[in-house]
Amino acid sequence: MTALDVVVMAAGKGTRMRSRIPKVLHRLAGRALIQHVLDTAAGLQARRVVVVTGHGAAQVEDALAQSAQASALAAPQFARQEPQLGTGHAVQQAVPLLPDDGVTLILNGDVPLIETATLRALLELCGGETLALLTVDMPDPAGYGRIVRNGAEVRAIVEHKDADEQQRKIREVYTGVMALPNRLLKRWLARLNNDNAQGEYYLTDIVKMAVADGSDVAAVKTDDKIQVDGVNSPVQLAELERAFQLRQARQLMEQGVRIADPARFDVRGRLQCAQDVEIDVNCVFEGVVALGEGVTIGANCVIANANIGAGAVVHPFTHIDGEKAGVKVGEDARIGPFARLRPGADLGPEVHIGNFVEIKNSTLARGAKANHLAYLGDSVVGERVNYGAGAITANYDGANKHRTVIEDDVHVGSNCVLVAPVTIGRGGTVGAGSVITRDTPAQALSIARGKQVSIANWKRPKKVKLPPIPGPG
């Protein structure tokens, strides 16, 4: 196979975004626009990827380097375009990084939804010898370079500002994606000039050069406009976001997932669903989320990096964020409403976590319950534990975290503080309002609170009116 080099153009200013953030770093489905492009390019197994930066170059390069490091992948190479003198000038900056052999695939960092299969078709058309273009028919082609043909043969790409009246009627346009042999790319780039309405060096001019040299120029047309839509404004970004999310929702529904309203559904990562999953409105899934068979997700939940077992119910307004450690929810568990599961929460089967309960870095065994207004951090909770309303584990001493162990069949009363490190013995009961600082025996009732005192005929203090505070001087 011919070696493949990928050049991603990411130097544009993106004036219409009206933002200090470089355009290619604006996010779609939770990832930077250019990261979508790079992830797709990774599927082509290119020998190198070169990103051409310009506006906000340092910010773009730093963001991509950090992303590669976080994913344990090789960072792309960078070529800077300063000043920005057109698309041809941009690719010229990458030329020193491209060997003479192989094929270059040129992509755009603000066209995030191009698919690997489409690019493979383009590379197959190129075949290591031909200049191959990706085109699409646009209902309104204003602003795009028109594909000028002589019969089936491509003869030129004419930019909108340079097109005559007849050429502007052409609906087939260039998408900004092309593939061609490196040796031909270098030859034609060296001959570019800026004799046009924009005074820029157009990459598209190499089509005329190819025709003049007698080289083959071919085009493959996609009928999927979303794949080649670029982002130039917040409006376009929002439109593409919704189109992408609707496509993801449709794919899941075709697999049997019941989504209450596809227009109010967002996946910003990867969502895997088993059979008979139900998802209510306004739910957001981030990172990697797996939902087991028969899972029900209530309205307005945000779930990130979690594995939720079969039959579990996540009630509305629940926030689950596993970050790197992940969150596990066992089969037939009940979570929420208004619950929060943080990194390291590992809930066994039939666990109940109720309203305004927060779990962090804790394991709860089968049938444990914390139904109201409670906190469990750095804890190991046994089977069938009942953890009362308002109870908390005091797991942090201001410098270090400590672990709380609550053994099987313990009952913790309301408004208790368990000061870690501490173990509550099997089958024990902690009386309401207790502050427990030492381990408790199994089967014991442990109470640690002040003795109740009632003072007869107590009179509340009366408010005293204070004199005004004198002003300066």
Image (tube, helix red, strand yellow):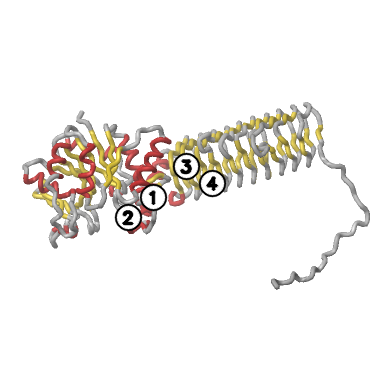
Q: Amino acid at mark 2?
A: Gly
Distance between the Cα atoms at labels 3 and 1? 17 Å
Which residue, as the protein is rendered here, is positioned at the far front? Answer: 473
Which residue is under mark 2? 14
Position in image of residue 366 (x %, y %): 64, 30
Which residue, as the protein is rendered here, is positioned at the far right? Answer: 456
Residue at 17% over, 39% down: 180
Q: Earlier in the sequence, mark 3 or mark 1?
A: 1
Residue 188 placement, left or right of 378: left
User: Nearer the observer, disc 4 or disc 1?
Assistant: 1
Distance between the Cα atoms at labels 3 and 2? 27 Å
Q: Earlier in the sequence, mark 4 or mark 1?
A: 1
User: How many residues crowd mark 1 within 10 Å: few (<14), some (14–19), many (20+)?
Assistant: some
Residue 212 placement, left or right of 26: left
Residue 80 seen anywhere in this rendered image of the structure: yes
Which residue is under mark 4? 301
Position in image of residue 29 (x %, y %): 41, 46
**Residue 465 got which mark?**
none
